[in-house]
Amino acid sequence: MENKDKKAINRRGFLKMAGAGSVATTAVLYGCKPNKTGSGEGGSRGEVPKDKMTYRTNPYSGDKVSLLGYGCMRWPLRKNSRGEDEIDQDAVNELVDYAIEHGVNYFDTAPVYIRGWSETATGIALSRHPRDKYFIATKSSRSNTLESGIAMYRKSLRELQVDYLDYYLLHSLGGGGPEEMKTRFLDNGLLDFFLEEKAAGRIRNLGWSFHGDVKTYDSMLAMDIQWDFVQIQLNYQDWQHADGVRNVNAEYLYGELTKRNIPAVIMEPLLGGRLSRVPSQALNIMKEVHPEDSAAQWAFRYAGTPKSVLTVLSGMVYLEHLQENIRTYSPLKLLNEQEYNALERVTKIMLNADYVPCTECQYCMPCPYGLDIPGIFGHYNRIVSAGYRLKSSKDENYKQARRAFLVGYDRSVPKLRQSSHCTGCEKCMEHCPQRIQIPEEMVKIDKFTEQLKQKTSF
């Protein structure tokens, strides 16, 4: 009875604070990339409204911000004449144009995104539009000196082709505890510089993003500074079930912000895509309530429901993902009690799945030994989502699941970039905001792969 009452209280607490895809396809399992015209996560089709976007108002600046924010971490790539990756600028321009036309006005980037290319590509695309049509957010990434921090900030202004930044963040606090934050921004005077830039109007809103250590979170909120916003990880799994190492429960993070009337910018509403590719039994629960809605729509509605959420970020590489998310927030239909109950059941299923907690943010890249770390974890997690993660060589679907994993692995990740080539150097781990023991996970996936190849028992 006590547990039942606790859940009821937690559910009511979320709804009070709030103010009120789908299983992987065969093509994805086998490593085929979705095209730009299909239904990438099983989303609904239909008209994409241009004038119904939900907006939230920043209480400090008065900005009217679209609830759907564009995360610029994963712009489309193409091969150049030398066979090397580069940004597909034409595709980026088209996505930005479509987003702005349909009411999206918040674009989030950083100097480190997409191997350092994101700010340039984002700046080119946005500069083709009137400056008052968009808000740009970027970040002060890892720098330990005043000079390097100022240089990064000024480079961001140049790359984005702007003379002021709407939203500027102290990036990824919490990984190294309060001492790291002190070293990166306090002892060197960099935070003082940003506060001066805000006073001069070149930074219109100053905030920070958080991953990890709760002591850092609490110490930042205790500072004698009026933060204009804070970026946190919030989704229905992390609301109460963050592991306390990679992240803190969103219930706590969001609650502390609402106490101080600080708007929340939301990252990882899909938990690196995992909440758009839920196991079949979880998807069936969703379909009982809304037969036409995708798993991604459920996750975005959850993230957008709390009233102090300013915007929810999504890294949308494909047009159909952008369209579905625009539909979801044009306008937003707030989560209700029945839907929240359904997501509690879904969460239990997700917590029992064998996922690697990778959000495919690519901070770990490039690997000095050429591994495609996000690609390896992404393929593994898609197999888990589809129920194809074998527990025994005697499993009923062994033959089909074995083929799905091995063929899909070779198609989605070149052999020389697979887990078997990990040296355990651990250089990737210092960059991972989720604090994944990447070499250990590589060993696990490589062992699983070899067992499938050799048809040995588990």
Image: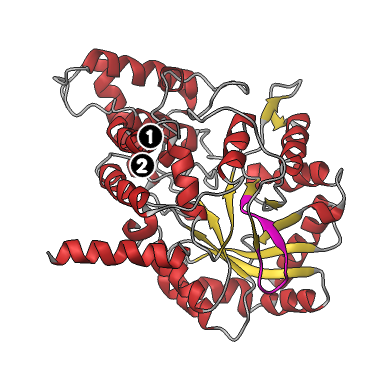
Of marks 2 and 1, which one's residue comes earlier in the chain? 2
Estimate how packed mark 2 is, as few (under 14), some (14 to 19) or many (20 or more) residues with alpha carbons within 10 Å: some
Q: Is residue 198 visible?
A: yes
Would residue 452 appear left or right of 157 to someone viewing this image?
left
Residue 248 appears in the figure = no
- Residue drawn at the location 75% of the way across and 56% of the way down: 135
The location of residue 348, given as percent across then percent down, is: 26, 47
Q: Quadrant of residue 128?
A: top right
Q: How many marks?
A: 2
User: Which residue corresponds to the image point at 40% horizontal and 60% vertical from the top-left?
Assistant: 247
- Which residue type does callout 1 highlight? Asn
What residue is at 53 percent from the left and 27 percent from the top?
40
Q: Nearer the viewer, residue 312 or 77?
A: 312
- The amino acid pointed to by label 2 is Val
Q: Is 408 on the left-hand or right-hand side of 180?
A: left
Task: Pick the residue in front: 137 or 5.
Answer: 5
37 or 9, nearer to the observer:
9
Expressed as whole percent of the image width and height from the top left, the position of residue 305 reads 49, 56
The quarter of the picture where the C terminus appears is: top left
Q: Indicate which disc residue 36 carries.
A: none
Q: Are marks 2 and 1 in contact (CB under 8 Å)?
A: yes
Left or right: residue 390 compared with residue 52:
left
Q: Which residue is identified by label 1? A: 381
Relative to 91, is 430 on the left or the right?
left
Residue 270 against residue 148 in the figure, above or below: above
Mark 2, residue position? 356
Dot 2: element: loop
Q: Which residues are magenta?
A: 57-68
Few, some or many residues within 10 Å of mark 1 (<14, 14–19, 20+): many
Q: Secondary structure at mark 1?
A: helix
In terms of image quadrants, where is residue 407? top left
Q: Residue at x 54, y 57 (%)?
A: 266
